[in-house]
Amino acid sequence: MGVTAQKFNQFTFLKLPAAWWTGVRVKSINEGSCVVTVKHSWRNQNPFKSMFWAVQGMAAELSTGAMVINQIRQSGKKISMLVANNNANFSKKATGRITFTCNDGHLIKEAIDKTVATGEGQTFWMKSVGVNEDGIVVSTFNFEWTVKVKSSK
């Protein structure tokens, strides 16, 4: 059994307080997809009265990384994970509730299986798309994740 959205929100409170205090919340998670929301407010806005790009980045990264954490946990192996690279595109001012969705969970298991089999690090790209309440894309983030079996010392 994987982790729940509620457990991830508790995790953010304890381990990622900047995400918690800016309103980033996991709404749903399974092996294939993760949905994270964040509502524009005075806590997370820039001087132009829209959501600060870094807050969008935290929500987008969590929508990808939560699935990586979940699948590593399910593997039962000691595996490290790290964002090696990322890029983003901003297409509209982010106001209101922004929902970030990643549907790339299918890429994780293959990378985990390869690093367990070979002991070599594996990389894969995951995309998270943020849409506003009208369904209009406001930003798209891509994250290159690396996973590697931890060496036993």
Image (spheres, grey):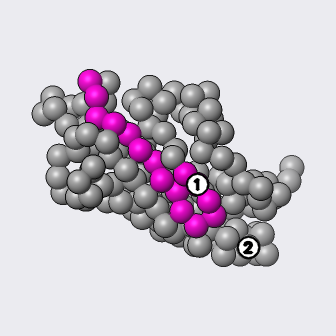
Q: Residue type at mark 2: give it.
A: Asp
Mark-to-mark CA distance, 2 and 1: 21 Å
Q: Residue type at mark 1: give it.
A: Ile
**Which residue does the image show at 58% across and 72% down from the upper left?**
107
**Which residue does the image show at 79% across and 75% down from the upper left?**
117
Horizontally, is 54 left or right of 74 in the view? left
Depicted 125 relative to depicted 2: above or below: below
Q: Are marks 2 and 1 in contact (CB under 8 Å)?
A: no
Depicted 91 relative to depicted 6: above or below: below
Q: Does the magenta stretch include residue 32?
A: yes
Look at mark 2 in the image and give the residue it sits on: 113
**Which residue does the image show at 66% across and 39% down from the upper left?**
7
The numbered disc on residue 29 is 1
The quadrant of the image that shows the N terminus is: bottom right
Q: Nearer the viewer, residue 36 or 107?
A: 36
The numbered disc on residue 91 is none
Q: Nearer the viewer, residue 148 or 89?
A: 89
In the structure shown, which secondary structural element does the residue marked by tag 1 occupy?
strand
Q: Nearer the viewer, residue 152 or 93?
A: 93
x and y, in percent, of residue 66 in the image: 58, 51
Horizontally, is 91 left or right of 2 in the view? left
x and y, in percent, of residue 25 in the image: 48, 39
Q: Which of 120 and 38 is in front in this view?
A: 38
- Farthest residue to the front: give it: 134
- Where does the magenta region start and end? 28-42
**Which residue does the image show at 46% across and 48% down from the upper left?**
36
